[in-house]
Amino acid sequence: MNRFAELLDRLAYEPGRNNKIKLLVAYFGETEDPDRGYALAALTGALSFKHAKPGLIRDLITERADPALFGYSYDYVGDLSETVALMWPKAELPGHNNPPPPTLTDVVTTLRTLGKAELPAQLARWLDELDETGRWALLKLVTGAMRIGISARLAKTAAAALGDKDAHEIELMWHGLSPPYLDLFAWLEGRGDKPVNSDPTPFRPVMLAHAIEDGDFANLDAADFSAEWKWDGIRVQAVAGHDARGHIQARLYSRTGEDITGSFPDLVPSLHLPGAIDGELLVLREGRVQTFNVLQQRLNRKVVSPKLIKEFPIHLRAYDLLGDDANDLRELPFTERRAHLEAFVARLDDPRIDLSPMVPFANWEDLAAARADPKSAGAGNDADAVEGVMLKRRDAPYLPGRPKGPWWKWKRDPHIIDAVLMYAQRGHGKRSSYYSDYTFGVWTHSEAGDELVPVGKAYFGFTDEELLQIDRFVRRNTTEKFGPVRHVVHEPDQGLVLEVAFEGLQRSPRHKSGVAMRFPRISRLRWDKPPREADRLETLERMLISMTGS
Amino acid sequence: MPGSSPRMTAKHRGESAYIGPMRPQDILMPVPAGLCCKPGGFHIDPVRPVERALITHGHSDHARAGHGAVLATQETLDMMRLRYGENFADSVQAITYGEEIRLGDVAVTFHPAGHVLGSAQISVTCKDTRIVASGDYKDARDPTCAPFELVPCDVFITEATFGLPVFRHGDAAGEVNKLLASAKLFPERAHLVGAYSLGKAQRVIALLREAGYDAPIYLHGAMEKITNYYQERGIPLGELRPVRGMKKKAELAGTITLAPPSATSDVWTRRFPDPVTAFASGWMRVRARARQGGIELPLVISDHADWDGLTATITATGAGEIWVTHGQEDALVHWCKTRGLAARPLDLVGYGDEDEGETAAITGEVEAQPEGETKA
C-alpha cells in the first residue's frame, strides 16, 4: 500500500503527461503481482466495493482526537481524507512484532468481502499501520474519490509501454480482462501468450481528424473526399455482441474508451444487432437536433430519471461501421464501410439511430458555401447543431489515433470579439514561470460610466512567441497582486486588447456579466487597438439571442 | 525529555489577589515594536528600530537593521552584517550560548534553538521568574546547527508556525531520498529545490551529502553569500557551483539546484531543462499548499518544530504559563488549556515570512533576465 501511495502522491503533483507515464511504467516495472494489477484496476476504475462514507471517516477521527483540534485542522487543510491521514494519532501497538502495513492486495481483497459493520474497525487497524501518505491513499481509495488527474487511458498506455506494446492492443482486450491482470502482465513481460479477448463488446480505438488550414486545400483533390456535417454532440462508439449464452449485450463508450452505458440506458434497447457503430450522441426533439447546451443536461448524471429520459430523448447519428457481427470492417475503405453502415442502419430500423447524411459537393467552393450556410445545404432546421464539416478520404481505412491526411475537420468560423485583458494568473507545469491564464472583459454601462466586466478566461490559442509578449506585458503593467493573480492595467487608453474566439454563448448566473463562453481562446493580440474600442456586453447579448433565440 | 524540572511559581499566579512587584507581563510584554522588556531596557526581535535589541536569529523577519545596540550570537551578527552591511546597528555585542549578561534588573542568557546556525532562545530572569522567548525553534536533528537545548522556565514563549496536529514533519533524510529517487528517474530534467536561503538551503545540502550525493550542487545567486558563510564556519557542504555561469540548458540536466522559493516560479527558471520543481518546507505536508505553489515534488523538511515537537517541548519546559506567537495560535492555546496550562496568544505582528527580502539581495542575476525585464 505504501508504494502505491507513493505513486499516487507523485502523480497528483506531476502535470506532464509523459512524466506521468514514466512514473507509472517505473511502478509497474518494480512492483510485483498482484499488487500492480490491483493498482492498474484502481487507476482505471475497475475496482468495485462499497465505498466508505465521509461520516464514517469523521467518526473515526473524532473518537481518537480532540474534536476542536480536528476542527481547526480540517478548516486549514480543507480535505477530510487528508486531514484525517495527517492527524491520525501514532498507534501505540503492543509488543515489538508490529504487523507490517497492509499491501494494496490485502486492502482490495479484504474490502471485497468485508461486512459493513466490520469496516470501521478494519479501517482503523490499517490507518494505525500505515504512514501519512499511505493513510491518505487508503482513504482516497475507500471513499472512491481518487481524482489524481489520471485517465484510464493513461494508465493503460503506461501498462502497454511496460511491454513496448501499443495501448490500442490493451484497449481491444480490456473488457475481457479482470483484476489483478496476471495474464496481461505476463504477456507484457514476455512470459505468457497474448490474452484472448472474450469480451462480446470490446472498445475499438477511435479515429480522429486534424483541423484543416486554408493552405491544405491546394494539396487536396475534392474528388478524393466525401463530406458530412460535423455534429455538435458527443462522439461515441456503440457496440453490441452476443455473450457466451447467446444473449445480445450492448455498451456505449466515450471516444477515450470510458464505458458510459450507465448514463444512457434509453439507447441500449436500440442496439439490438451485433456490430460497432462510430457516431454522435445527440438530443432530438420532434426530429430536430438540439444544441450542445441541451445535450449537456444529460452528461455526468449519476441517476438517470425517467423524467430526464423523456425530456432529453437521446439519439445516435451513425458516422461509420467498424464491425458487423464478427466481421472487422476497419481495413476496408471508407466508401465500402459506408455501404455496410447504410445496410446496417436499415436492418436496425430503429427511430433512435439514423445515418449521418452526406453533404454533396463538386469542388471546395461548393463545400465552403455549404459550411457557411448548412441550413440551405441540407441541414435545414438542424443547422444550429452543425459545427462544421468533416472530410473523409474515400479510400481510407479506419485507423486508430489521429493520422494526418485521411480525415479533416473544417469547423465553422468561430465567433469573435475583442476583449480587454483584466487579470493574469501563472500557469502550471512548464508554464509556471509565465502568466498564461487570462481573464478578459468587455465594456458595459454602470452608474459610474463605462466599466469593464469580466466575460471569460482563456489560457491557450496564442503562440509561444505571443505568450512571451503577453507575459512581459503583464509583468510591466501589473497594478495590484492578489496571491497568484495579477491585476493588469485596463483603462480606456491603457491596456491590451485580445481577440477572443469562441464556439458558443450561454446564459450564466454565475458570471457577473450573465453570459458564459464555450471554448474561448486567444486568437490574436490587438496591440494596435486601444481598449476603449473593444467590444461591449451588448454585442454579446445580441450574439446570444441570435444563437439561442432567447 | 531529560533536564525537565517543573518549577512551581505558577501556583502564585492562581491567587488572583496577588499583587507582587513582578508579574510575567511586567517583565516582558508585547508592544508594536515587538516584545519589550522594561526592567531590562530592551526589545527581543523588534520589528521597528529600538535603542537596544536582542536578536534570536538571523532571518530577516526577526533580525532587522537600524537598531541602536544589538546583542546576539556571533553567527547572527555576521548574518546581519552580510545582509545589511557593516553599519546595520550603532553598536553590537556578541554573546555565547550559556553566557549570562545583566541588563538593568534582569539576567539574560542565550541557548541553542536548533532553528538555524546561531539561532538562540533568549532566557530572561527577573527576581525568581524566568521567561524563555524561543524565537523559532526545532527539536529535530540538523547537521548545520547546534541542537535545541531545553531550558526549564516559568513562562515559555513558543512559536506556533506548525501549531496544528496535521503537521508532523517526519524524517528529513527520507524526504531527501525522495529527491534523489526523482533525480534518478528523470536524468534528463533539472531538479530545482526551493528552500529558504538562510538555514534550510544549507541543511538540505548537508542532508544530500549525508545521503551520499557527491555531485556538484548548484546555487541561485541569492544563496551564494550565506552558503559560503556556512562553509567558513566549518560546515562541510561539498562542491557548490553558481548557476549564474551556466550558459547551456543541457549542462543542467540531471543536476540539483537550490533556489529561494520565490525564484522557482520566476523567469529565472527558464534556463533549466524541463525542471522538476521541489520545495523543502513544513508547509508541503498539506497538498493544497503545494499545489497552489505549482510544486511537483513537495519535500517535508522544516526548521520549525512540528506539532509533536511543540507539545513535547512545552510540556518539558515545566512552564505553567505559555504565550503563543506567530502561527496557528488558536489550536496550540486550546491544547495547552486541555493540559491545565495557562495559555494565551501573544499579539505580535511582522513575523513569519522568513524569505522576505532575501531575493531582493540577488546578485548577478538581474542581467540574466530576458531583455527589458524588470523586477516587479
Image: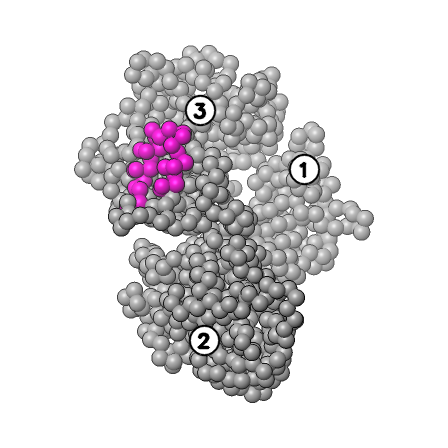
Q: Secondary structure at mark 1?
A: loop
Residues in magenta?
Answer: A100-126
**Residue A425 at x, y percent in the picture:** 57, 54
**Residue reaching furthest to the bottom:** B91
Residue B180 occupies quadrant: bottom left
Q: Which mark is residue A311?
A: none
Q: Amino acid at mark 1?
A: Pro
**Left/right of residue A337 with respect to residue A417 in the rendered view:** left
Q: Amino acid at mark 2?
A: His
Earlier in the chain: of badge 1 and badge 3, it is 3
Q: Name the residue tied to disc 2.
A: B111
In which chain is the residue bearing label 2? B
Q: Secondary structure at mark 3?
A: helix
Q: Name the residue tied to disc 1.
A: A509
Residue ID at (74%, 50%): A451
Residue A492 visible at all: yes
Establish if A453 lies above or below A152.
Answer: below
Alpha-carbon span between mark 1 and mark 3: 31 Å
Residue ID at (25%, 39%): A33
**Residue B50 at x, y percent in the picture:** 63, 80
Alpha-carbon span between mark 1 and mark 2: 60 Å
Q: Name the residue tied to disc 3.
A: A261
Q: Is residue A122 magenta?
A: yes
In which chain is the residue bearing label 3? A
In the picture, the quarter occupied by the C terminus of chain A is top right
Q: Is residue A51 magenta?
A: no
Of A4 and A476, the residue lying toward us:
A4
Q: Amino acid at mark 3?
A: Thr
Mark 3 surroundings within 10 Å by alpha-carbon count, few (fewer than 14), some (14 through 19), many (20 or more): some
Residue A27 visible at all: no
